[in-house]
Image: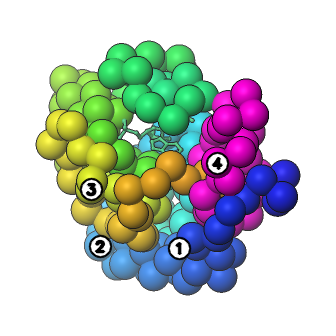
Amino acid sequence: MNNDILKVLYSEEDIAAACKRLGTQLAEDYKDKTPLIICVLKGAILFMTDVIRDMDIYATIDFIDVSSYNGGTASSGTIKLLKDLDTDVAGRDILLVEDIIDTGRTLKYLEDLLKDRNAKSIKVCTLMDKPSGRVVEAKADYVGFNVPSEFVVGYGLDYEEKYRNLPYVGVLKPSVYSDK
Ligand SMILES: O=P(O)(O)OC[C@H]1O[C@H](OP(=O)(O)OP(=O)(O)O)[C@H](O)[C@@H]1O
Ligand code: HPA
């Protein structure tokens, strides 16, 4: 699997430092609240489980599974809700945890859903933000890295459902795509 990687963008050490920085800031900002931390599956699974370790506050967690890339490198434009939350979000302070914001469509879909369900507040923490990909307006409150205009994999992010278990974020060799 490592042989498919052209270059590493963010190493394990880079990611650990970002998690510590963000987790510490989030703990400070939410110290007087008990937020509901929502992990957006599947991509955010590694990031969410790492960043919450640096948050010494009371919080509850839940998971929602939405998909629009269907394993490929481009957004289909249609967000499918694959698994809904178990928690009632009405009146809750929500922290959405994402791996990446690209076109912004997923985030817009989730924010609309949470507003419809009367969440008290909604903030967004993303490991990566790719502003060059934006199609709809979407903004994160906490960002680990601003990424260049490249398709990235690893640390939760996939290509054809693979590479999620890489401990770093990188870019695939072109041959991985053209071999198909
Ligand atoms: O800003 P956008 O263009 O909407 O892209 C961001 C979303 O795309 C990816 O999810 P994906 O649909 O690939 O599902 P996955 O997390 O299960 O891989 C990623 O995990 C984000 O949730
Ligand atoms: O660059 C990306 N990589 C993997 N999944 C994604 N979903 C949106 N952008 C990306």
- Residue wearing tag 2: 29
Assess whether mark 4 and mark 1 are in contact (beta carbons under 8 angstroms): no
State which tag comes first along the sequence, 1 or 3: 1
Q: Are the residues flagged by discs 2 and 3 in contact, CB closer than 8 Å?
A: no
Mark 2, secondary structure of its residue: helix
Label drawn at residue 19? 1
Please say if 82 is above or below 4: above
Magenta region, residue range: 157-180
Which residue corresponds to the image point at 71% horizontal and 45% vertical from the top-left?
175
Given the image, on which type of amino acid does mark 2 rest?
Asp
Pick the residue in front: 26 or 88.
26
> Considering the numbered disc 3 on the image, is that residue within a helix, a strand or a loop?
helix
- SS under mark 1: helix
What is the quadrant of the C terminus in the image? top right
- Kindly indicate whether the residue at mark 2 contacts the one at mark 1 (C-beta within 8 angstroms): no
Q: How is the image coloured?
A: rainbow
Image position, residue 126 (x, y; %): 40, 57
Q: Main secondary structure of the magenta part?
A: loop
Q: Nearer the viewer, mark 2 or mark 3?
A: 3
Dot in front, 2 or 4: 4
Q: Nearer the viewer, residue 97 or 164?
A: 164
Residue labelled with disc 3: 131
For label 3, the crowd category at 10 Å Cα-Cα, with few meaning under 14, some 14 to 19 and many 20 or more, is some
